[in-house]
Image (cartoon, grey):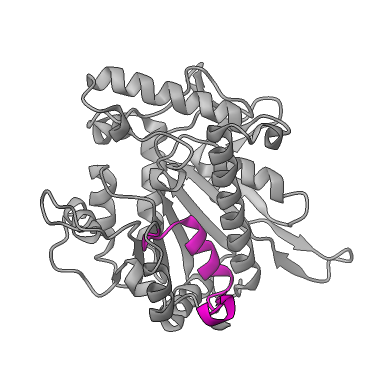
Amino acid sequence: MSIFDKYNIDMAHEIRRCALEKQLNILIGSGCSAEALPLMSQYGDDDINDRNEKLVKEIIRRSKISMLKNITKYRKFEIIDKIIKTQDAYKKFIYSIIGILNLSNSRQVPRTVNIFTTNYDLFIENAVNDLQSHSRFIFNDGASGYFERILNSSNYNQVVAYKGINDNYISEIPSINLIKSHGSVNWEYKDDKVIVSNMVYDKPMVVLPTGYEEQETFINNYFHDMLRKFQIELDKPQSILIIIGFSFQDKHIAKMVKRALQNRELIVYLFVYKNNRDERDGKNGRDRILENLQVKDIPANLKVIVGNDIYSEEYIEYISLTPESDIKLTLDNLSEILSNPEIQVQIEDEEENN
């Protein structure tokens, strides 16, 4: 029997240590939900308006499915099985974030993580809902109110603490800020307000992938406020940004990240899903993301991570023996690194099998 480390210990520990010691920000793209939800590229050469309509309609449909009670009873259906697997990955991710916040020193940095996403779906919200019953943390989606919850970006500027029964100590409670820069399937624009609900709307307030997202987000005050929050957090000293599932097709966000890299106290870890080389243009995943980011000379504070960087040599050799396996990085990998960088893999040797 062989036992070896799954990850490059030095690299994995570096990422986890930065997450513990610095102000943590995470940017999540559509790649993290791609197993369960469609991407724009899947709609081929349709007219852009038709593509947008089909894309949003399908995301709404599958988001409604994800909200079903006792959804596991319907796991025999392929799409529901994929939704459940994706939901489990997000739940594991949020749990790892809570662990990091609980271990961080609130005297050095706030026990707060800012999760920025361009996704419309509710995987993060569903994960939070499952975990809040047995984990103590604050979830802040920017909305406040009781019977009617109204979105206001100023709601992100708060810290919540627990004090002892006798007021003899104060302990900051871990907080997760969710900032959805392109809207959400549970947002509705009504009477000049954005209502955040616990249901999926048929006509939600979202930014469509038209190629003009930059103009739309800056014209609309609500989306502009979300992006402004993103820029402010990246400009702060002693900050870290982890990017996963994001290819920088959104040019306005690419510009903001590129600008933020001028803050030399910011460290950016950019996870590349797959680094396979495209036969059509000879570019690999790393090349394409850097091209979208419009970065030629990689600054010292930008760490572009592919599978060969983060996996151990033994693990790469192991998975390369399995033809159907790809050396890729997913949300599960980030969750494992944040939770336990020294996770090990145990396999039976061929001689033992014989």
Residue 4 visible here:
no
**What is the quadrant of residue 134 in the picture?**
bottom right
Tell me what residue is drawn at x 23 percent, y 44 percent: 251
Instruction: Look at the image and give the residue range highlighted in magenta.
Output: 325-354
Q: Position of residue 191 (x, y in %)?
A: 51, 16
Residue situated in front as seen by the camera: 170 or 286: 286
In the displayed structure, would residue 235 be above or below residue 247? below
Quarter holding the C terminus is bottom right
Which residue is most to the right?
A: 166
In the displayed structure, would residue 328 be above or below residue 223? below
- Specify whether residue 22 is painted magenta: no
Question: As drawn, is 307 to the left or to the right of 132?
Answer: left
In the displayed structure, would residue 71 be above or below residue 90? above
Quarter holding the N terminus is bottom right
- Specify whether residue 337 is painted magenta: yes
Q: Position of residue 225 (x, y in %)?
A: 40, 40
Question: As drawn, is 168 to the left or to the right of 121?
Answer: right
Query: How many discs appear?
Result: 0
Q: Position of residue 163 (x, y in %)?
A: 79, 63
Residue situated in front as seen by the camera: 345 or 57: 345
In the displayed structure, would residue 60 be above or below residue 283? above
Tell me what residue is drawn at x 45 percent, y 59 percent: 25
Residue situated in front as seen by the camera: 277 or 161: 277
Which residue is most to the front?
A: 354
Tell me what residue is drawn at x 53 percent, y 73 percent: 20
Q: Position of residue 135 (x, y in %)?
A: 74, 57
Tell me what residue is drawn at x 63 percent, y 66 percent: 99
**What is the quadrant of residue 164 in the picture?**
bottom right
Residue 318 visible here:
yes
